[in-house]
Image: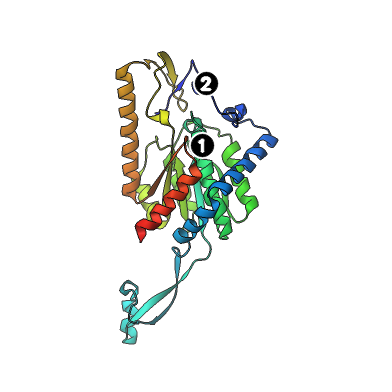
Amino acid sequence: MWWKSRKRKDTAPSPEVREEVREEGRASLSEIAKKVKAVELVTRRHSSAHLLGQYKSRFKGQGMQFSDFRVYQYGDDTRHIDWRTSARHQDTYVKTFEEERELNIICVVDVSASNLFGTEEYNKREALCLAIAAIAFSAIENNDRVGLILYTDGVERYVPPKKGKKHVLRIIDELLSFEPQKKGTNLTKALEFVSGVAKHNSVVLLASDFYSTLDRKRLSVLAQRHDLIAMHAADPRDIAFPPLGLMELEDPETGATLLVDTSSSTFQKQFSEAQQKKLKANFDELRQSGAALVKLGTERDPSKEISRFFHERKRARR
């Protein structure tokens, strides 16, 4: 569970490039427009050229649809033999496939209160936004559709998949400026919604800090039908709480408070162990369900981390 100090809300000062109004979600239209443009420039300059190649190699050609039958030839993949058709025609026939030229990419993003936390260059929600933007800009270069689902205790906003730069900029705008009605997290409801709107063989990007309870059964079903990629956003202080003395901490999602001595070695150890145990359990759930996992940090360029993830994933599949 994530906690914030009630005494010191500025335990780590924000860089100058982050507007003070961001935490409250009340940025003016001009400020949001500047931030959207900044995200576009950062993701295009730092990663688009490299990520585009990785994107093509990972996604294009992975979604295949049945085309026709033909007689088996030496070298054909035996897994594509259609035994029923072969029996009817008294010859060996294989299925042929053609590449699906257009994909749907559904970004399912946790906008609960815990994701506004950040002590480094970004907060966790911004880190997820940069990573998603890098993929989205690569997607429009390939004429693919990108959609968005924002969730807390329930689904709060759905933007159906569409093509084009204008649509991607709208998605980035939503990621940066949307003000959720609730603070908590219920991933199960988001997964139920995704299952109802995502077309077969979509790419589902599940973005969160993953401190909520996971439903492995629903995750497994989703991973069987789609390419499920879990994007984990983390801040260094998720694990290592700074020694700041006696403090009253508040859970940003439930409002529950707790008075602790943050300088206590016992508290430091228990806090770190509890956080790591929770994350490990959820990472295991994600992997066992069939989801791929990419880890993002508020102290690193998320678009570069995404590029590295696809590069390593491509190499592992060779």
Circle 2 Cα neighbour tier, 10 Å, few/some/many (<14 / 14–19 / ≥20):
few
Question: In the drawing, what numbered circle is on residue 10?
Answer: 2
Q: Residue at x 39, y 18 (%)?
A: 243
Query: Residue 267: percent from the left, percent from the top?
Result: 32, 19
Depth check: give the residue in front, 124 or 254: 124
Question: In the drawing, what numbered circle is on residue 294?
Answer: none
Q: Residue at x 46, y 54 (%)?
A: 203
Question: In the drawing, what numbered circle is on residue 125?
Answer: 1
Q: Residue at x 55, y 58 (%)?
A: 144
In the figure, residue 262 lies in which quadrant?
top left
Residue at far bottom of view: 90
Three-letter amino acid code at the position of disc 1: Arg
User: Mark 1 or mark 2, which has the lower sequence index?
Assistant: 2
Three-letter amino acid code at the position of disc 2: Asp
Residue at far top of view: 246
Tell me the quarter of the image containing the C terminus: bottom left
- Figure check: 65 above or below 42: below
Secondary structure at badge 1 equals helix
